[in-house]
């Protein structure tokens, strides 16, 4: 739920005392491509380390990049996702549910990512090439190379009733680089290139995060009102996304013997509950609305509520 795009008015009954449908177009948040819902959950990222400095540097960067991208997407703020490093133990089964559940407890999170040690190939570096506009004499030459790697990323969501371990694998090639004055020996160039792997891993982590970022869809929702001041006021609150304030008025409007008005107020309460993320309450209000007088848009809202449960 992000922003209101446009507003229209649709009368679904003609008489002056009939309700009017106020249509609001919203951009709504949906689970990521992975199928995992991260909204409102505490997330931790753990990366494994071994005795391979290339794997460790690249893995550290990937973990940082993944956490940074998810913090921005879910609006939790920089540093809100804990990043942990853990040394590999011989014989450890790091993709097992038990291991990931232990990490959930240790990190105090709802969702944990575990980045396995990367399987890296041989890093190669090309000769130095002059830089067109160097910032200094020490950076007037650039050497670049390649480092193939394979990765495994495991994710476990303690709040998912399926208790499934999600596994994501992939392979790519990093392009390490090193600036110099053109006179450094191969060992020095290789060492500087290793230092660039954290930065390259960060970029890779940002790319990987696309599987876990929210998906957004444009949808239309309807608020029902009658042409009297209390209904207008509630609709104005809904326009400002002040659902709780609107609910206070709709709760008062339930106190009537007019079944149609009770149905409309209950429907609006169902919509507000849905927008606030209380899907069970939304279902109960929609049941009450249907019992008094089922509205034309009831089925559409019910399908949306059920899809979120």
Image (cartoon, rainbow, N blue to C red):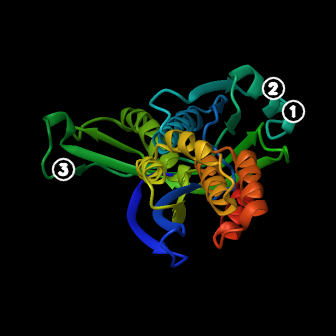
Crowding at label 1, few (<14), some or many (≥20) Cα neighbours within 10 Å? few
- Separation of marks 2 and 3 at Cα, in angstroms: 50 Å
Q: Nearer the viewer, mark 1 or mark 3?
A: 1
Residue beneath the point at 52% across and 68% down = 17
Residue beneath the point at 74% across and 20% down = 106
- Separation of marks 1 and 3 at Cα, in angstroms: 51 Å
Q: Is residue 215 left or right of residue 200?
A: right
Mark nearer the N terminus (2 vs 3): 2
Query: What percent of the width, then of the height, locates residue 8?
Result: 40, 69
Query: Are the residues tagged 2 and 1 within 8 Å (C-beta)?
Result: yes
User: Badge 2 is on which residue?
Assistant: 102
In the image, is residue 70 above or below residue 109?
below
Is any part of residue 127 visible from this angle? yes
Query: What percent of the width, then of the height, locates residue 105?
Result: 77, 23
* Quadrant of the rendered image containing residue 88: top right
Mark nearer the N terminus (1 vs 3): 1
Crowding at label 2, few (<14), some or many (≥20) Cα neighbours within 10 Å? few
Crowding at label 3, few (<14), some or many (≥20) Cα neighbours within 10 Å? some
| Label of residue 131 in the image | 3
Element type at marker 1? helix
Q: Is residue 156 left or right of residue 93?
A: left
* Quadrant of the rendered image containing residue 186: top left
């Amino acid at each position: 739920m992000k922003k209101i795009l446009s507003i229209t008015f649709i009368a679904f009954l003609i008489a002056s005392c009939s309700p009017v449908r106020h249509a609001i177009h919203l951009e709504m948040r949906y689970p990521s491509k992975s199928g995992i819902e991260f909204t409102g959950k505490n997330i931790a990222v753990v990366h494994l380390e071994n005795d391979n400095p290339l794997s460790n540097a690249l893995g550290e960067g990937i973990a940082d990049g993944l956490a940074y991208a998810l913090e921005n997407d879910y609006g939790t703020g920089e540093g809100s996702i804990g990043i942990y490093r853990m040394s590999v133990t011989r014989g450890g089964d790091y993709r097992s549910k038990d291991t990931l559940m232990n990490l959930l407890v240790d990190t105090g999170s709802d969702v944990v990512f575990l980045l396995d040690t990367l399987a890296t190939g041989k890093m190669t570096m090309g000769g130095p090439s002059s830089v067109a506009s160097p910032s200094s004499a020490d950076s007037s030459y650039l050497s670049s190379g390649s480092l193939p790697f394979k990765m495994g990323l495991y994710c476990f969501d303690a709040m998912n009733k399926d208790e499934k371990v999600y596994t994501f694998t992939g392979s790519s090639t990093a392009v390490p680089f090193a600036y110099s004055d053109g006179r450094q020996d191969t060992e020095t160039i290789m060492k500087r290139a290793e230092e660039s792997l954290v930065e390259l891993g960060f970029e890779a982590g940002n790319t990987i995060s696309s599987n876990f970022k929210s998906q957004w869809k444009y949808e239309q929702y309807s608020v029902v009102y009658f042409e009297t001041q209390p209904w207008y006021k509630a609709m104005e609150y809904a326009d400002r996304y002040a659902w709780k304030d609107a609910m206070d008025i709709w709760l008062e409007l339930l106190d009537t013997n007019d079944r149609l008005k009770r149905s409309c107020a209950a429907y609006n309460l169902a919509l507000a509950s849905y927008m606030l993320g209380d899907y069970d309450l939304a279902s109960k209000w929609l049941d009450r609305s249907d019992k008094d007088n089922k509205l034309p848009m009831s089925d559409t809202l019910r399908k949306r509520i059920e899809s979120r449960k």
